[in-house]
Image (cartoon, helix red, strand yellow):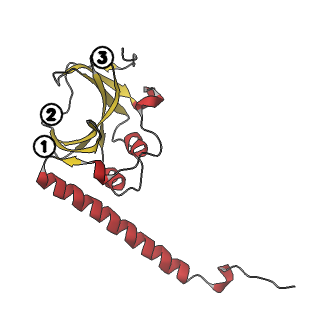
Amino acid sequence: MLPTVHGLHLPDLPIKNRRLIADLIYFDGALLSYYRDNGRSHYLYYWCDADESYNRWLVVQVGDHTLRRFLARQITLRQLLLRTERTDAYLLDVGSDGQPARILRVELADLPDDYLPADETWYDASLSVFYDHLAARELMSMMQDSLQEAQSKLKLIEQIVSRAPEALQPAYVVS
Protein backbone atom coordinates (compact mmCIF):
# COMPACT_ATOMS: atom_id res chain seq x y z
CA MET A 1 0.00 0.00 0.00
CA LEU A 2 1.31 3.42 -0.94
CA PRO A 3 1.84 5.89 1.92
CA THR A 4 -0.76 8.59 2.41
CA VAL A 5 0.34 12.00 1.20
CA HIS A 6 -1.75 15.06 2.01
CA GLY A 7 -2.91 17.24 -0.83
CA LEU A 8 -5.88 18.27 -2.93
CA HIS A 9 -7.63 15.47 -4.85
CA LEU A 10 -8.26 16.41 -8.48
CA PRO A 11 -10.55 14.78 -11.04
CA ASP A 12 -8.01 15.26 -13.84
CA LEU A 13 -4.43 16.38 -14.32
CA PRO A 14 -4.54 20.08 -15.32
CA ILE A 15 -1.81 19.57 -17.94
CA LYS A 16 -3.45 19.21 -21.34
CA ASN A 17 -2.19 18.08 -24.74
CA ARG A 18 1.06 16.72 -23.44
CA ARG A 19 3.22 14.41 -25.48
CA LEU A 20 6.03 12.16 -24.46
CA ILE A 21 9.38 13.36 -25.79
CA ALA A 22 11.83 11.09 -23.99
CA ASP A 23 12.48 8.88 -21.05
CA LEU A 24 15.48 10.72 -19.66
CA ILE A 25 16.17 7.87 -17.26
CA TYR A 26 15.19 4.41 -18.45
CA PHE A 27 16.32 1.32 -16.58
CA ASP A 28 14.04 -1.72 -16.81
CA GLY A 29 11.29 0.85 -17.36
CA ALA A 30 10.84 4.60 -17.34
CA LEU A 31 12.04 6.37 -14.20
CA LEU A 32 12.10 9.96 -15.46
CA SER A 33 9.98 10.96 -18.45
CA TYR A 34 10.01 14.30 -20.25
CA TYR A 35 6.75 15.65 -21.68
CA ARG A 36 5.92 18.87 -23.46
CA ASP A 37 2.54 20.48 -24.05
CA ASN A 38 1.33 22.52 -27.02
CA GLY A 39 2.50 25.69 -25.31
CA ARG A 40 5.94 24.08 -25.22
CA SER A 41 6.06 23.99 -21.42
CA HIS A 42 8.30 21.28 -19.96
CA TYR A 43 7.03 18.60 -17.57
CA LEU A 44 8.89 15.82 -15.83
CA TYR A 45 7.30 12.63 -14.56
CA TYR A 46 9.49 11.08 -11.91
CA TRP A 47 8.69 7.55 -10.70
CA CYS A 48 8.79 7.64 -6.91
CA ASP A 49 6.93 4.61 -5.53
CA ALA A 50 4.86 1.53 -6.32
CA ASP A 51 2.72 -1.13 -4.71
CA GLU A 52 0.96 -4.20 -6.11
CA SER A 53 -1.70 -2.05 -7.83
CA TYR A 54 -0.16 1.31 -8.75
CA ASN A 55 2.95 3.16 -9.81
CA ARG A 56 3.23 6.58 -8.22
CA TRP A 57 4.64 9.41 -10.32
CA LEU A 58 5.64 12.90 -9.23
CA VAL A 59 4.80 15.42 -11.97
CA VAL A 60 6.38 18.88 -12.02
CA GLN A 61 6.67 21.70 -14.51
CA VAL A 62 10.23 22.86 -15.04
CA GLY A 63 11.63 25.95 -16.70
CA ASP A 64 13.64 25.91 -19.88
CA HIS A 65 16.82 27.23 -18.24
CA THR A 66 16.62 24.79 -15.33
CA LEU A 67 16.05 21.85 -17.66
CA ARG A 68 19.06 22.93 -19.72
CA ARG A 69 21.21 23.05 -16.60
CA PHE A 70 20.14 19.50 -15.67
CA LEU A 71 20.89 18.17 -19.16
CA ALA A 72 24.29 19.86 -19.09
CA ARG A 73 25.01 18.17 -15.73
CA GLN A 74 25.21 21.51 -13.91
CA ILE A 75 22.53 20.54 -11.39
CA THR A 76 21.26 17.21 -10.08
CA LEU A 77 17.81 15.74 -10.59
CA ARG A 78 16.92 16.57 -6.99
CA GLN A 79 17.91 20.22 -7.52
CA LEU A 80 15.91 20.28 -10.75
CA LEU A 81 12.75 18.94 -9.12
CA LEU A 82 13.04 21.36 -6.22
CA ARG A 83 13.40 24.32 -8.62
CA THR A 84 10.00 23.86 -10.21
CA GLU A 85 8.03 26.71 -11.74
CA ARG A 86 5.53 26.46 -8.91
CA THR A 87 5.78 25.12 -5.40
CA ASP A 88 3.03 22.57 -6.06
CA ALA A 89 3.38 19.34 -7.90
CA TYR A 90 1.16 16.39 -8.71
CA LEU A 91 1.20 12.79 -7.60
CA LEU A 92 -0.37 10.33 -10.01
CA ASP A 93 -1.22 6.81 -8.97
CA VAL A 94 -1.27 4.99 -12.30
CA GLY A 95 -2.81 1.53 -12.65
CA SER A 96 -1.71 -1.31 -14.90
CA ASP A 97 -3.94 0.10 -17.66
CA GLY A 98 -1.76 3.23 -17.79
CA GLN A 99 -4.56 5.48 -16.57
CA PRO A 100 -4.33 7.59 -13.41
CA ALA A 101 -6.55 6.21 -10.66
CA ARG A 102 -5.76 9.06 -8.26
CA ILE A 103 -4.46 12.56 -8.88
CA LEU A 104 -3.30 14.69 -6.00
CA ARG A 105 -1.93 18.23 -6.09
CA VAL A 106 0.76 18.46 -3.44
CA GLU A 107 3.34 20.86 -2.10
CA LEU A 108 6.87 19.62 -2.68
CA ALA A 109 7.72 20.41 0.93
CA ASP A 110 5.02 17.93 2.08
CA LEU A 111 6.42 14.96 0.16
CA PRO A 112 8.28 12.18 1.95
CA ASP A 113 12.01 12.68 1.44
CA ASP A 114 12.34 9.28 -0.21
CA TYR A 115 10.00 10.50 -2.98
CA LEU A 116 12.83 12.73 -4.18
CA PRO A 117 15.97 11.39 -5.86
CA ALA A 118 19.30 11.17 -4.08
CA ASP A 119 21.52 14.25 -4.13
CA GLU A 120 23.99 12.52 -6.45
CA THR A 121 21.53 11.74 -9.29
CA TRP A 122 23.02 13.36 -12.39
CA TYR A 123 21.75 13.19 -15.96
CA ASP A 124 23.29 10.35 -17.94
CA ALA A 125 22.44 10.46 -21.66
CA SER A 126 23.23 6.74 -22.02
CA LEU A 127 20.07 6.00 -19.98
CA SER A 128 17.79 8.06 -22.26
CA VAL A 129 15.28 6.82 -24.82
CA PHE A 130 13.90 9.39 -27.29
CA TYR A 131 10.47 9.01 -28.92
CA ASP A 132 10.13 12.26 -30.86
CA HIS A 133 13.15 12.81 -33.12
CA LEU A 134 12.44 16.49 -33.80
CA ALA A 135 12.10 17.21 -30.09
CA ALA A 136 15.20 15.10 -29.42
CA ARG A 137 17.19 17.36 -31.73
CA GLU A 138 15.83 20.38 -29.84
CA LEU A 139 16.78 18.75 -26.55
CA MET A 140 20.30 18.02 -27.79
CA SER A 141 20.55 21.62 -29.00
CA MET A 142 19.52 22.79 -25.52
CA MET A 143 22.28 20.66 -24.03
CA GLN A 144 24.83 22.03 -26.47
CA ASP A 145 23.76 25.64 -25.78
CA SER A 146 24.14 25.05 -22.04
CA LEU A 147 27.61 23.56 -22.50
CA GLN A 148 28.69 26.45 -24.72
CA GLU A 149 27.36 28.92 -22.15
CA ALA A 150 29.33 27.17 -19.40
CA GLN A 151 32.49 27.17 -21.55
CA SER A 152 32.10 30.90 -22.21
CA LYS A 153 31.78 31.58 -18.49
CA LEU A 154 34.85 29.47 -17.77
CA LYS A 155 36.88 31.40 -20.37
CA LEU A 156 35.75 34.69 -18.83
CA ILE A 157 36.83 33.50 -15.38
CA GLU A 158 40.21 32.38 -16.78
CA GLN A 159 40.70 35.83 -18.36
CA ILE A 160 39.88 37.60 -15.10
CA VAL A 161 42.24 35.38 -13.14
CA SER A 162 45.04 35.82 -15.68
CA ARG A 163 44.75 39.63 -15.39
CA ALA A 164 44.76 39.64 -11.60
CA PRO A 165 47.43 41.94 -10.20
CA GLU A 166 50.53 40.35 -8.80
CA ALA A 167 49.49 41.68 -5.41
CA LEU A 168 46.73 39.11 -5.33
CA GLN A 169 49.14 36.28 -6.12
CA PRO A 170 50.51 34.40 -3.11
CA ALA A 171 53.82 35.80 -1.96
CA TYR A 172 56.44 33.56 -0.48
CA VAL A 173 58.87 35.01 2.04
CA VAL A 174 62.18 33.27 2.55
CA SER A 175 63.69 33.78 5.98
Q: CA distance from mark 3 to mark 2?
A: 28 Å
Q: CA distance from mark 1 to mark 3?
A: 34 Å
| Residue projecting furthest to the front | 28
Q: Quadrant of the N terminus?
A: top left
Q: So how many labels did they put on this image? A: 3
Q: Can residue 64 be seen in the rendering of this structure? A: no
In the rendered image, residue 52, in percent from the top left (x then y), is placed at 30, 16
Q: Residue at x 21, y 27 (%)?
A: 13
- Please rate how many residues cluster around mark 2, counting C-alpha atoms within 10 Å: few if below 14, some from 14 to 19, many from 20: few
**In the image, which is nearer the foreground, mark 1 or mark 3?**
3
Q: Are marks 1 and 3 in contact (CB under 8 Å)?
A: no
User: What's the amino acid at mark 1?
Assistant: Asn
Crowd around label 3: few <14 · some 14–19 · many ≥20 (10 Å): few
Q: Which of these two is toward me, 83 or 54?
A: 54
* CA gap, disc 2 and disc 1: 8 Å
For the C terminus, give its image quadrant. Answer: bottom right
**Residue 116, image x and y in percent?**
42, 34
Determine which residue is flagged by label 2. 16
Q: Position of residue 20 (x, y in %)?
A: 17, 41
Q: Which residue is mark 1?
A: 38
Q: Is residue 9 left or right of residue 39?
A: right
Which residue is tagged 3? 52
Mark 2 belongs to which amino acid?
Lys
Q: Are marks 2 and 1 in contact (CB under 8 Å)?
A: yes
